[in-house]
Amino acid sequence: MAGRLRILVTGGTGQVGTELARQAWPDHVELILPNRQELDLASSEAVRAYVMAGRFDAVINPGAYTAVDKAEADCTTAFAVNAMAAAALADATRELNIPLVHVSTDYVFNGSKSEGYQEDDPINPINVYGASKAAGEHAVRLGNPRHVILRTAWVFSPHGSNFVTTMLRLADRPELRVVSDQKGCPTAASDIAEALRIIAMRLIEDRDAPVGTFHFVNAGDTTWFGLASEIFRQEREAGSSVPEVIAISTTDYPTPARRPANSVLSVARLVDQYGISPRPWQLALKDTLAALRNERSKGAPS
């Protein structure tokens, strides 16, 4: 497609937004990545005004209120960011006749299914965060026919606060107790960003590109205990001292928000319609841990 393309990325300083900025976009693509001061997702009026004035060719919306436990007591803000902002984005992008790629979550499901969730399985969130994201999905579906909703899960990266960086921060303890009865799909923010880039470019260049709801997670599933064990197995192989990881049940680690016992997502639809085949989560984790070790070595005194 000739001419310059402008793509708005919300949540530009978050894990996925940061990785989107690092993607190998074509030379004619300009990413606009406003920070929270420049684009307040808690204000749907500000969101709509920003999009209408921006001359964008597409919008990617990974920006979200993701503090799962905090959301239980901050329902208003969670719904403002995750639902009302999504509605404003869908309304504005429909009016401008441009595609919207919206990032959602495995937490729209209640976790009672024994196998992996398909895109069309009934949603039934069990916490405020999941409910706010489900409402955002609904708003996007109603608001703009040219949308892709991309559900993902258990996001990690070398930056920001996530399970991997938290485990490494606590690695000097003799032992760590980690929940072993919640199952999901660890997923690298960098891999999510690559999928979003492919989807957004196809939606821009092909008006007949597939739309609707898709899942993207790294291949394979595990528990939080399994993920922690793999983190420290790889760290031990790299020469680091690691704690003992002890498996506990969800009831041993109560949190304000309930979590799904199973939030494994099937990616077959994305593979079929977009040709995106995720790599194993262990390989994605290996790259993230290597990046974090590189950062630590740069910061170490010489």
Image (cartoon, rainbow, N blue to C red):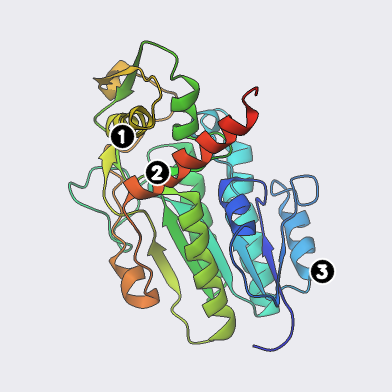
The tag earlier along the polypeptide, 3 or 1, is 3
Question: What type is the residue that disc 1 sits on?
Answer: Glu
The residues tagged by marks 3 and 1 sit, at their Cα atoms, a distance apart of 46 Å
Q: Position of residue 100 (x, y in %)?
A: 58, 69
Q: Is residue 22 above or below residue 97?
A: above
Residue 109 seen by the camera: no
Amino acid type at mark 3: Ala
Horizontal side, residue 270 vs residue 195: left or right: left
Q: Earlier in the sequence, mark 2 or mark 1?
A: 1
Quarter of the image that includes the C terminus:
top right
Q: Amino acid at mark 2?
A: Leu
Number of residues whose C-alpha sits closer than 10 Å to that of mark 2, classed few (under 14), some (14–19) or many (20 or more): many
Q: In terms of secondary structure, where does tag 3 sit? A: helix
The residue identified by callout 2 is 285
Q: Residue 54, which numbered label?
A: none
Distance from the alpha carbon under mark 3 to that under mark 2? 39 Å
Residue 53: which numbered mark, if any?
Answer: 3
**Quadrant occupied by the N terminus:** bottom right
Q: Residue 144 location in percent, x, y?
A: 57, 72
Q: How many marks?
A: 3
